[in-house]
Amino acid sequence: MATGIGSLPHRQPAAAVTDVLSRLAEMPYWPQLPGRDPSEGMNAQYAGALAPLLSVDPADGEVRVNPGLDRESALAGFYERLWGQADDFGLRSESAAGFFEFIDQVTAAPAEAYPWVKGHVTGPLTLAASVLGADGKAVLYDDEVAEAVARGLGAAAAAQAAQMAPLGRSVMIFFDEPFLSGFGSAFTPVARQRVVELLGFAHEEARQRCDAVLGVHCCGNTDWAMIVESGTDVLNLDSVGYGQHLLLYPEAVRELYARGSVVAWGAAPTEQYQGHETPQGLWEELRGLLDQVAALGVEPAVIKAQGMITPACGMGSLSQDAARAILDLTRGVSELARQDYG
């Protein structure tokens, strides 16, 4: 199946959702609209799930450690909410207009339309790396606060799935982790085991509360075995730019498929989109990559059954015309993959 990632450039929620539903008929996703309001940025949108630990500055949408509470009080207040008010972790209309428009349009559609729906939550590494504590360091390096962020985002994923449950469709939720692009460089100084732990905390919290299928999206190069070790159901990568890097982890690839998990191939370029791409050309490129995966010992029928197609990344910084064209490419590659592979 084909689905999308995160943001769109639209400012009108109805137009954004219509563009998604008309192109991704089997697994549409709700669009973040950061150009509409700062509160719809990928960090600000989920800070409400982390109150009173974190707060959002309404002027610029920046997420900060709550200045009105000491660290211990903030953590205690957060865990009190986590244990007793988990239904309060869902999205809010004032900061997620695309989500609520999506709910309205899917609700109004025939029951047989859109068998799957997809949501997304900012990943714990990405959010924790972007927020500074009182000591001036990212809260990613404060073990207790970072764990709280991960568990809060897991609860937010489950709350989002609960908000989607009345639609009567199967639900998939991605944790979006752009921070993990270039893992191991000086720009991402975090221990490998810490990444696995924090992603694991988020998955654990979500799975205790819902039965949605969970994924991790990273739009750059990273340690893909690390993502597999986190226990995620779906690994989503920019296969246009970094597909060859996945082949460097053959044991992890085989483990991923053996346990029934899915690779979501980001086969339609976003940042590298030129405007002359075709579904046929992109499929030929992906087909070559899938043949190399098969050479690692994975049956083509398994690759096909446990595969999805997405854009390489979110499209909030692009034009609306480009975003629509990339969604069309995504759908086109999916259709060709089904016809030609396995």
Image (tube, grey):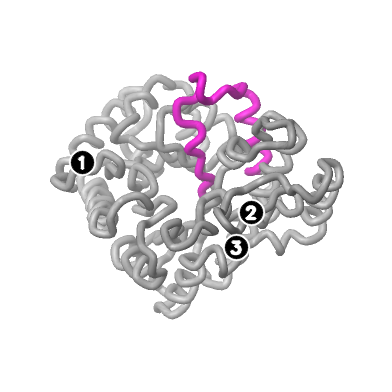
Q: Three-letter amino acid code at disc 2?
A: Val
Categorize mark 2 by other alpha carbons within 10 Å: few (<14), some (14-19), many (20+): many
Q: Identify the secondary structure beneath mark 3.
A: loop
The residue that label 1 is drawn on is: 282
Of marks 1 and 2, which one's residue comes earlier in the chain?
2
Mark toward the viewer: 3 or 1: 3
Q: Is 207 placed above or below 141 here?
A: below
The residue that label 2 is drawn on is: 56
Q: Identify the secondary structure beneath mark 1.
A: helix
Q: CA distance from mark 3 to mark 2?
A: 14 Å
Q: Residue at x 60, y 54 (%)?
A: 46
- Find the magenta span and give its range: 174-203
Mark toward the viewer: 1 or 2: 2
Pick whichever, 181 or 72, lies toward us.
72
Q: Identify the secondary structure beneath mark 2.
A: strand
Of marks 3 and 2, which one's residue comes earlier in the chain?
2
On the image, which quarter does residue 239 sit in?
Answer: top left
